[in-house]
Image (cartoon, rainbow, N blue to C red):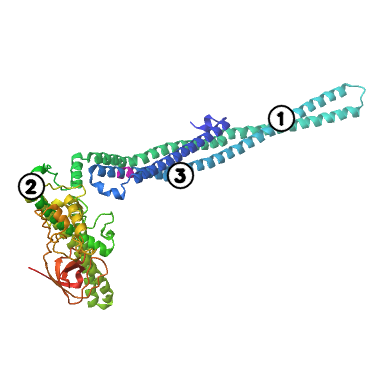
Amino acid sequence: MSWGTELWDQYDNLSIHTNKGIEVLDKYANFLRDRVAIETEYAGKLRRLVKNYQPKRKEEEDNEFTSRQAFRNLLKEVGDLAGQREVVSETLQQQIIQSVALLSKTLREDRKKCLTDGTVLQQCLSAQLSSLERAKRNYDKAYRDSDKAVENYKKADMDLNLSRAEVERYKNIMTSKNQQSDDAKNEYANQLQKTNNLQQHHYSMLLPAVFNRLQELDEKRTLGIREFIIGAADVESSVAPIIARCMEGIVKAGESINEKEDSLKVIERYQSGFTPPTDIPFEDLSKMDLSNVSNYSHSTIKGTISVRRKGVRNNILQSIFGSNKNSLTADGQKEDFSDLPPNQQRKKLVAKIAELQQRVDQETNTRDGLMKMKIVYEANSSLGNPMTVEGQLNESEHELEKLKRDLKKFQDILDKANQLQVANNSPQSHRNQLQNGHRTSRHSNGSASADDHHDADDQPDDAGSLSRSDSEDNVAQIQNGHNNNNNGSSASPESGLGTSHTSLPGSGQGSANENAIGEETCYETEVELLQPLGTCRALYPFEASSEGSIPMSEGEELQVIENDQGDGWTRVRRANNSNGWDEGFVPTSYIECTLFA
């Protein structure tokens, strides 16, 4: 069934229907545009959400926990979801919306052309109907005039009063009117035939062809909407497997969370390596005799002075360089991580050594490549000038040497940290902690009290700081009250510089404080000189420009009392003119050392 046959008289309704159909197509196109806008906005907001919740650089170390890793994987999958929504948006825009717009434009143009052709056909038929109507009116008028002329002639022919000429005139008028009536009749019949033919051709062929074209346009529009809806669904379905995999990834990320593993990583991350403090012993002062007090004070003073000497190197080097900021890493930690607890220090050192080893390997490969290039250039000068590689090769050698020194330095620090951990965990260490009835106490920052070093003068300080005991206050009082021979000199046992005295002030001076304590109470506070590790000879003259360093002349012989610990400075000693000793630091590269076996 076709519109041209069944709807031959519904031209106006078909025009309205096809217009509404195209409006529906445009509405669907607007719907797709709005959906594309929503998809684009949704994808953009998802991406901003993922960006806002990405781990910050300062939180990267927390990524070792499974919950953090799962959340990072979740963000990755959500980012992939956003990407799929963008794919849907772009595909709908490029394939569906553009096709809908093109179809709508084509349909409007074809509909306009069809309606124009229909209007022309309607105008032709109307014009013919108008001609038929005029011919009919003319025929009707001519027929009435002809009847009236015949009637007038008959009356004149019967009237005896009229002349022959008058009767003849009426006869001529009748003949003329009859002729006009016949002509009008023939014209009317001719127009009627034309109109019937045109009308039949119009409704049987011309107008149905226009209506059939409108029907094809409407069916094309309907089929287009169907294909567009299915196509939009196919676009959505094409990304469904990827979205499903994203959901599977999210589920997998959730299932990867292991609470026990995270708990173990927390222990590994924050475990200090310290042992819990032992019970605090009861000190019955009424049962402590004076000799025990004297021995305890002597040992405490000696231990305090010995431990203080451990911080001398850092303090002097800080005075030489002006500040310790250069020894800090980018995150504010010390270069050797000595401000961390033992376990964390070893963990950081292992990571640093691995990083340096990787850099050494890379630099070694670079040097080997440059050497091969130089050999090739020397064998065939047309390929290049060997001197252009020489500078890069020297620079690579220097960089490799520096990296190896840094690697050796951190390996030594790690070995010392491991040895210290073994010493702290040994039975002898626990026995030393309880010797003389006094407990070793560890503070939360990794420092030790002065009693830690009572019989362990060579044990390094964990964090470079000490908690002061009452015995240290006694030492300060003795120094402040009876160091009359120092004349305000800064060469105190704490500084470790300048003239070293063989005993504390007041130990052999007969001071008033000593008499006040009692003749039987004697503080044996002799400060022993550090045994030399070897000798050294100055290769170059050195002018001491900072406190803590001493000058030396070329060829001068000195005693080595502390080796270079990786900072480029060696502690030396020499006799002075006042029967004492001068101590301080000199650059390691300026001396030639000979250590004792």
Task: Locate residue 296 relative to residue 359 in the image: left or right.
Answer: left
The secondary structure that dominates the magenta segment is helix
Mark 1: which secondary structure?
A: helix
Report the residue at 57% width, 37% height from top: 206
Q: Amino acid at mark 1?
A: Lys
Q: Which residue is disc 3 drawn over?
A: 98
Determine if the magenta segment contains residue 442. no
Whether tag 3 and tag 1 are in contact, CB under 8 A, the answer is: no
Which of discs 2 and 1 lies nearer the camera? The answer is 2
Q: x, y (%) of residue 341?
A: 19, 50
In the displayed structure, 513 sits above or below 67; it is: below
Query: Quarter holding the C terminus?
Result: bottom left
Q: Amino acid at mark 3?
A: Gln
Report the residue at 93% width, 22% height from top: 161
Report the residue at 80% width, 30% height from top: 177
Residue 289: which disc? 2
Q: Which residue is disc 1 drawn over?
A: 136
Q: Quadrant of residue 227?
A: top left
Q: x, y (%) of residue 487?
A: 23, 64
Q: Earlier in the sequence, mark 3 or mark 2?
A: 3
Query: Which residues are drawn in magenta?
Result: 76-80
Task: Locate residue 159 relative to residue 298 in the image: left or right.
Answer: right
The span from disc 3 to disc 2 (Cα, nearest Å) is: 104 Å
Which of discs 3 and 2 lies nearer the camera? The answer is 2
